Image (cartoon, coloured by chain):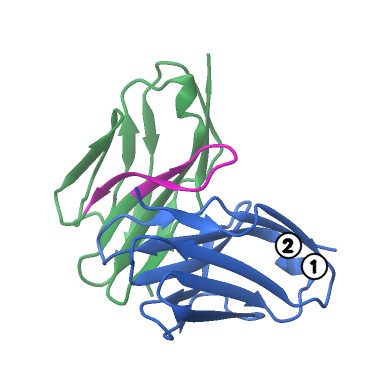
Amino acid sequence: DVKVTQSSRYLVKRTGEKVFLECVQDMDHENMFWYRQDPGLGLRLIYFSYDVKMKEKGDIPEGYSVSREKKERFSLILESASTNQTSMYLCASIIEVGTEAFFGQGTRLTVV
Amino acid sequence: GNSVTQMEGPVTLSEEAFLTINCTYTATGYPSLFWYVQYPGEGLQLLLKATKADDKGSNKGFEATYRKETTSFHLEKGSVQVSDSAVYFCALIQGAQKLVFGQGTRLTINP
């Protein structure tokens, strides 16, 4: 079975901190995604990557950056955390277009 | 750009009722369409998919048909159970691997 693992289930950070959310997949997938999930807004795409060292902005990239140094790992970085970045963050990977996306369990981030 | 619109929730039904959750999309060309489900405290998992027009995806008693003429992919189930209570997301992917989701519909089934 494909496994997508996010490093933390729950995280509490202070305003202004630099925050790293890690995501690792074990099936050699090319494509990886970071979303945030907020009530009434569904899943909004922050960044995605279709290859090592490649990244594309999603719909809401402001305040975030990403890193993909190895194929299996896709990191989301909050450069200076703010309270409006309190949310559930979901990582996903797919092997190719048209196939199933596999999701991690999510990281619930609270910025205080 | 591509987008997905789902019927607004929450939806509350009694056990054994018929379920429809509407989903329409906007895209150029022929995207692949998906329904994902999120049970409480869990990540999303694929429920069903369709990759071309007139395809019908089905799983666990749920069905959805890819209708290009109406740009729709409505989710249906003939008789829902309490265990179907979850949040359901319609999604599409096309071209440069950008996977786009609708806003989600929370479904609650009462015994």
Query: In which chain is the residue bearing label 2?
Result: A
**Quadrant housing residue A50:** bottom left
Q: Relative to A40, say whether A78 is above or below.
A: below
The quarter of the rendered structure image containing the C terminus of chain A is bottom right
**Quadrant housing residue A102:** bottom left
Cα distance between the residues tagged 1 and 2: 6 Å
* Element assignment for label 2: loop
Q: Residue furthest top?
A: B111
Find residue B102 and report its horizontal and vertical position in percent: 45, 56
Which residue type does callout 2 highlight? Thr
Image point (38%, 44%), residue name: B22
Image point (54%, 43%), residue name: B42
Q: Which residue is mark 2?
A: A86
Q: Reply yes or no: does residue B45 show up in magenta.
A: yes
Among the chains, which one is blue?
Answer: A
B26 relative position to A106: left or right: left
Query: In which chain is the residue bearing label 1?
Result: A
Which residue type does callout 1 highlight? Thr
Find residue B10 and report its horizontal and vertical position in percent: 56, 37
B62 relative position to A93: left or right: left
Q: Reply yes or no: does residue B4 show up in magenta.
A: no
Image point (49%, 64%), residue name: A24
Q: Which residue is mark 1?
A: A83
The stretch in magenta equals B35-50
Among the chains, which one is green?
Answer: B
Say whether marks 1 and 2 touch (CB < 8 Å): yes
Image point (15%, 55%), residue name: B53
